[in-house]
Image: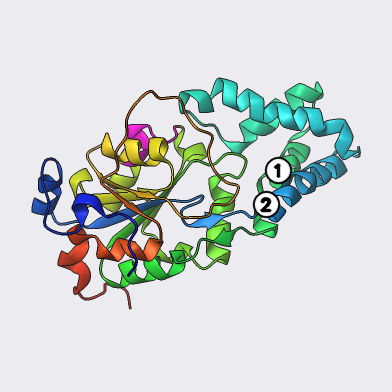
Amino acid sequence: MDLCVLCDLCGDNHHGDHREHREHMIKAIAFDLWETLITNSHEATRAHGPLRLDRMARILATTPQSIEEAYRYVWDRCQELYWSADKDVPCRTQIEHFVEALQIKLDEATMQALEDAYANVLVDVLPSIVPGADEILSQLSDRGYKLGLISNTGRTPGYALRTILDRLNLARFFDAMVFSNEHGECKPRRSIFDALRRSLDVEFNEMIFIGDNVYADVYGAQRCGMLAVHFAPPERGTAVAPDVDHGMTIEPHATVCNLPEILALDVLRPLITAPGRRA
């Protein structure tokens, strides 16, 4: 196996805060979603916005051009009010900001239709599975680990992402999933990691978190006392979160360039030969 970097989690050089995790067997492995397990190509991303605008415009009996400014306002407004503070809101709140920008009033049926059009575009234009994601989830599941997922959601809410994961045949692997628009806070907030921990019924020092974002994923997991693995593939899609000027030096416990490399982490070996818990 051509490993990228496995730091202190592979081999015999274990020290510091890693010792605590070796004394507590890893029972659960949790993943970020975008650019860790699924990704969007540039072509798919270019299709999403126009399709979303077209569907919403049809509901309002207008043109996509006439609502584009309001559509873009939603993202800026959510960034200003919520996401910049690591908070999140239901998808309906985004639609309310859209209607606010248009300065119109709509009945409930129209609001629901707009939300459906806004939220479900990626259900119809599916993301791609990151190479190795289905393989690693299957192997970890078969080897007895509880598997969890945390995702900051953006325009596509948790209910749509569950459908996407089901259609990609990935949902079946997870014991628990937490989405920021449903939880109310985003990674790297401790509360969203704690919500997953409680759902999996484990302690933080019995968990590993794997994600592509050093701040949201690695820092977020480490501040809770979890082992954190940075996923740094040679190529990434378009669903990459913007950089955050956090002023910190963040060092993951390990870095992998390909998801199957996770199986080489020494801290996982106690369960590698354990019987699978799923038939």
Q: Residue at x 34, y 34 (%)?
A: 191
> Which residue lies under the disc numbered 1?
118
Tag 1, which secondary structure? helix
Q: Amino acid at mark 2?
A: His
Q: Quadrant of the C terminus?
A: bottom left
Say if mark 2 contacts mark 1, CB within 8 Å. Answer: no
Residue 270 lies, in percent from the top left, at 15, 65
Tell which of 141 and 38 is nearer to you: 38
Q: Residue at x 19, y 74 (%)?
A: 273
Specify the segment rendered in magenta.
Answer: 185-193
71 in relation to 207, above or below: above
Q: Between marks 2 and 1, how big is the CA–CA gap?
A: 19 Å
In the displayed structure, does residue 205 sit left or right of residue 44?
A: left
Residue 128 counted in the magenta span: no
In the displayed structure, does residue 264 sit left or right of residue 159?
A: left
Residue 186 counted in the magenta span: yes
Tell which of 21 and 145 is nearer to you: 21
Q: Nearer the viewer, mark 2 or mark 1?
A: 2
